[in-house]
Image (cartoon, helix red, strand yellow):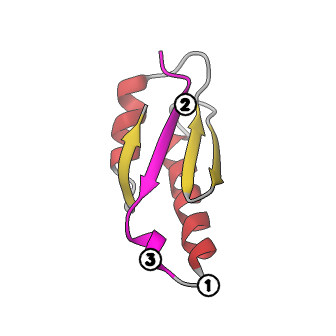
Amino acid sequence: MYKAFLIKYSEIGLKGKNKYLFENSLIEQIKKSLKDIGEFNVSKTQGRVYVECPDIYDYDGAIEALKSVFGIAWICP
C-alpha cells in the first residue's frame, strides 16, 4: 500500500503574491475530501502538496476523493 501521495496543482502556480491563499484553500479542500476515509497528514513544500497516508486506508476511495477536488492536476502515489 502506498504511504504518501504527491499532488501537483494546475493554475494555482500562476498566481502572484496571493498564491499562498489558493494553496491553503486547496489543502483545506483535500483535508475535507479525505476526512471520511482516514487520518491523512496534508502539507505543502516547494510548490507541491504531500499527503501522508495512515497504515490502513481505502486506496481507491482516497483516489476518488482526491479526483473530486478542484485544482488538482496530478496525483502521484
Q: Which residues are magenta?
A: 1-15
> Residue sitting at 57 percent across and 76 percent down?
19
Foreground: 22 or 38? Answer: 22
Furthest residue in direction front, as rendered: 46
The answer to whether residue 22 is left or right of residue 59 is right
What x and y, as percent, mark residue 56? Answer: 56, 16
Residue type of the residue flagged with mark 1: Lys
Furthest residue in direction bottom, as rendered: 17
Q: How many marks?
A: 3
Label 3 and label 2: CA atoms lie apart by 25 Å
Label 1 and label 3: CA atoms lie apart by 10 Å
* Residue underneath mark 3: 14
Describe the element under mark 1 as helix, strand or loop: loop
What x and y, as percent, mark residue 22? Answer: 54, 72
Mark on residue 35?
Answer: none
What x and y, as percent, mark residue 42? Answer: 63, 45
Foreground: 58 or 43? Answer: 43
Do the residues under discs 1 and 2 have CB atoms within 8 angstroms? no
The quadrant where residue 24 appears: bottom right
Residue type of the residue flagged with mark 3: Leu
* Residue underneath mark 1: 17
> Residue sitting at 49 percent across and 80 percent down?
15
Residue type of the residue flagged with mark 2: Ala
* Residue underneath mark 2: 4
What x and y, as percent, mark residue 37? Answer: 51, 31
**Mark 3, residues whose alpha carbon is within 10 Å: few (<14), some, or many (≥20)?**
few
Q: Is residue 73 above or below residue 15?
A: above
Q: Earlier in the sequence, mark 1 or mark 2?
A: 2
Label 1 and label 2: CA atoms lie apart by 29 Å
Question: Does residue 4 show up magenta in the picture?
Answer: yes
